[in-house]
Image (spheres, grey):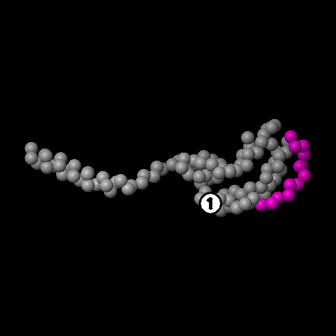
Amino acid sequence: MVTMKKSILTKTLIIAAGLPLLAGCVVYERQPPPPPGQVVVDENPPPPQYEVMSAAPGPLDVWFWVPGAWEWRGHWVWVGGRWAARPHPGAVWVGGGWGWHGHRRVWVRGYWH
């Protein structure tokens, strides 16, 4: 009986001694990768570059000017503006921007809406 009490007392003391060590621990939860079209980036893109928009190749209800933008390809790369055929009538281009995925800041590429 005395051995059992000593064993319980020893375990309790070991746990109590270890608690202050755990108080300063930080637990990082592993987050899934961002969805397609989103990239975790630690630096802001440079300012937009100046562009000259050319004449539309056809009617504006079919063609839309997609402005140039910085894209992340391991580093920021400028992709110049261009005319693009709308994927469906009334489609609108939504330019890229910053968003959040869990606790991480992500760059969301532009897309058609």
Quadrant housing the C terminus: top right
In-image side of 74 versus 47 (left or right) = left
Residue wearing tag 1: 43
Say which residue appears at 21% left-offset and 52% top-offset. 13
Q: Position of residue 89 (x, y in %)?
A: 81, 37
> Looking at numbered disc 1 in the image, what kind of residue is underneath it?
Glu
Residue 55 on the magenta segment? yes
Say which residue appears at 90% left-offset and 43% top-offset. 59
Q: Position of residue 85 (x, y in %)?
A: 82, 45
Say which residue appears at 42% left-offset and 52% top-offset. 27
Quadrant in the picture for residue 54: bottom right
In-image side of 97 versus 52 (left or right) = left
Say which residue appears at 85% left-offset and 58% top-offset. 52
Is residue 18 visible to the viewer in this orientation of the structure? Answer: yes
Q: Position of residue 82 (x, y in %)?
A: 81, 53
Residue 39 on the magenta segment? no
Callout 1: SS: loop
Task: Looking at the picture, tell me which residue is in the foreground, 109 or 44.
Answer: 44
